Image (spheres, grey):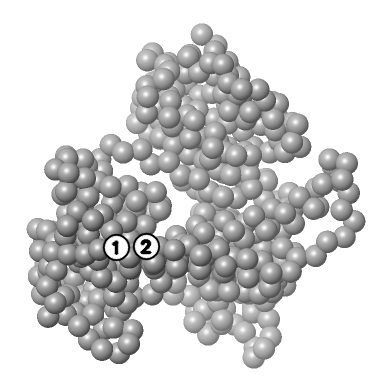
Amino acid sequence: MKTYDAIVIGAGQAGAPLAKRLANAGLKTVIIEKRFYGGTCVNDGCTPTKTMIASAKAAYMATKSHELGVPVKKFSVDMAVVKKRKDEIVLRSRNGGLKAAEKTRNLDVVFGEASFTGEKTVEVKLNSGKVQTFKADKVFLNPGASPAIPEIEGLSEVQYLTSTTILDLDYVPEHLVVLGGNYIGLEFGQMFRRFGCKVTILEKSARIVAHEDEDISAEMQNILELEKIDILTNTHAVKFKQKTGGKITVTIDEKGEERKIKCTHVLVAIGRKPQTEALNLLSAGIETDEDGHIKVNDKLETSTEGVYALGDAKGGPAFTHISYNDYTIVYRNLIEKANFNINDRPVPYCMFTDPQLGRIGIDETEAKKQGIKYKVAKLPMAHVARAIETGDTRGFMKAVVDPDTKKILGATVLGPEGGEIMTVLQMAMEGGITYDRIRYCVFAHPLYSESLNNLFMTLGD
C-alpha cells in the first residue's frame, strides 16, 4: 500500500489543476486516470467538437460567400483532414497537460481504474495489468460523466454513435438521425449537416432547447430548419432494426402516431450519466443520489469527511468552467483557508451552434415563475450594425431587468458571437452595473457589444 497526502481520481478540468496545485503546496499527491489526461473537455468534448465546428463553419461560409460578392462555385469536405486536424489539436492539449503533471514535484500520475476498498483507501487496476492500493487523508473525486444510453428496442443491435464515437468518423454519413434536441444533439446535427449529411433530430419534448424561453427555442428551430435540418418535436424512437450492412430503420412515435424513418447512422445525444458505478463508493461511506451523482455540501465535501467531489459526477450544471471553478473553491478553502461555497456563483453557458446561444442568470420564464417584477429588453440581430455588415442577422439579444433597481437579472443572446456578448452582460451583473448606465456607455464602433446601447434603449425610461 502506498500512502499519500492526497489522492485525486480523474484528470479532468477539476482534477488535473487541483492535483498540481496540491503538489505545489507541498502535499504528496497521486492523480489516477483510467483513460486520457484532460478528461472529457480535452478529449471528447470542448476541444474536439469546437475544432470540428470551425471546419463546418468554413463549409457553411463557402455556401453563403456569394452573398458577400465572393462566389465559391465548387468545394468539397475532406473528413479525413477534418479528423486529422482535430486529432492533432486534441493530442497537443492532452500531452501538454500530461507532461506538465509529470514534471510537477510531489505529484505521481497513475493510469488505471480506481475503486474504493474502504474509507480513503483506493485500489487501482493499472492499465498495465497490475494492482496497487493507495491511501490518503484527503481524496478528491473527479470521475466525470459518459453518454447515457436509453433502453430502446433494437438500439443495442445497431452500431449507434455517441458524442465520443462520432468524433472518430473520417467520412460524411449519408443520413444521421439524432436522438435529443439539446446542446450535444444540436451542435453535432448542425455540424454534420454542414459537412453534407442529411440530418433528422428527434426531440421528445414539445420544443428543442426546452429549458430556454419559448421565443429562443422557436428562433433556434427556425435557424436550423433554414439549413434543411429536419426537427421532429414531441417525437421519440421506439424501435431500431438494421439488416446486415444495410440501412437502419427507426420506428418513431410522432405525436402519438407511429411511422418509420430509414437512415445510415444514429447519434444518441439524450444526456450524460456520472461515472461512479465502478468507484464502489458505498465501501467508503460516500453517498450518491438515485442517478448516481455524488452528494456534496456547499463546500463540495461528500458524506465522508475529507473526501470531495468535483465536476460533472456531483450533479448540477455540467460545464467545464463549473468543474474548474469547483477546483478553485476546494483548493482555496483547504490550502488558503478561505470560505467559498458554490451557492451564489454565476452559471454562464454557451451552446456552440452557429449562431451561438449564450446565457447568464434568469430568463423570462424563470422570472415569471418567481413572481418577481421585471422588464424584458429585446433586440433583433437585424438591428445590429455589425451583424448587418458581416451578413449574418440571425437571432436576437434579450435581457431581463429589475425595473426598480435597474439591475440586470439575466440575459440570453442567440446570435453571432452570442457567448461573447453574454459575457459583457455577465461582467455588468458581477459589477452591479445597471442597464441605464450601459444604455449610454461608450463602446467601440461597430462591435456587436456596442448594440447593448440599443438593447436597453428599448426599455425607455
In the figure, is residue 197 to the left or right of 159? Answer: right
Q: Residues within 10 Å of mark 2 (few under 14, many from 20)?
A: few
| Tally of marks | 2
Residue located at (62% from left, 74% from top): 169
In the picture, which quadrant includes the N terminus?
bottom left
Q: Position of residue 346 (x, y in %)?
A: 36, 38
Q: Residues within 10 Å of mark 1 (few under 14, many from 20)?
A: some
Of residues 152 and 431, the one drawn nearer to the viewer in this rendering:
431
Of residues 51 and 197, the one drawn nearer to the viewer in this rendering:
51
Distance Cα–Cα, label 2 vs label 1 = 6 Å
Quadrant location of residue 24?
A: bottom left
The residue under label 1 is which amino acid type? Answer: Thr
Secondary structure category for the residue under label 2: helix
In the figure, is residue 18 to the left or right of 61? Answer: left
In the figure, is residue 128 to the left or right of 160? Answer: left
Residue located at (75% from left, 31% from top): 389
Residue located at (28% from left, 58% from top): 20
Q: Position of residue 308 (x, y in %)?
A: 19, 58
In the figure, is residue 215 to the left or right of 70? Answer: left
Note whether 368 is above or below 221 in the view shown.
above
Note whether 153 is above or below 393 in the view shown.
below
Q: Position of residue 377 (x, y in %)?
A: 54, 23
The residue under label 2 is which amino acid type? Answer: Ala
Callout 2 touching callout 1 (CB < 8 Å)? yes
Secondary structure category for the residue under label 1: loop
Find residue 100 and name its label. 2
Note whether 110 is above or below 373 in the view shown.
below
Does residue 312 show up?
A: no
Note whether 346 is above or below 312 in the view shown.
above
Tell me the residue that label 1 is attached to: 104
Quadrant location of residue 388?
A: top right
Does residue 339 show up?
A: yes
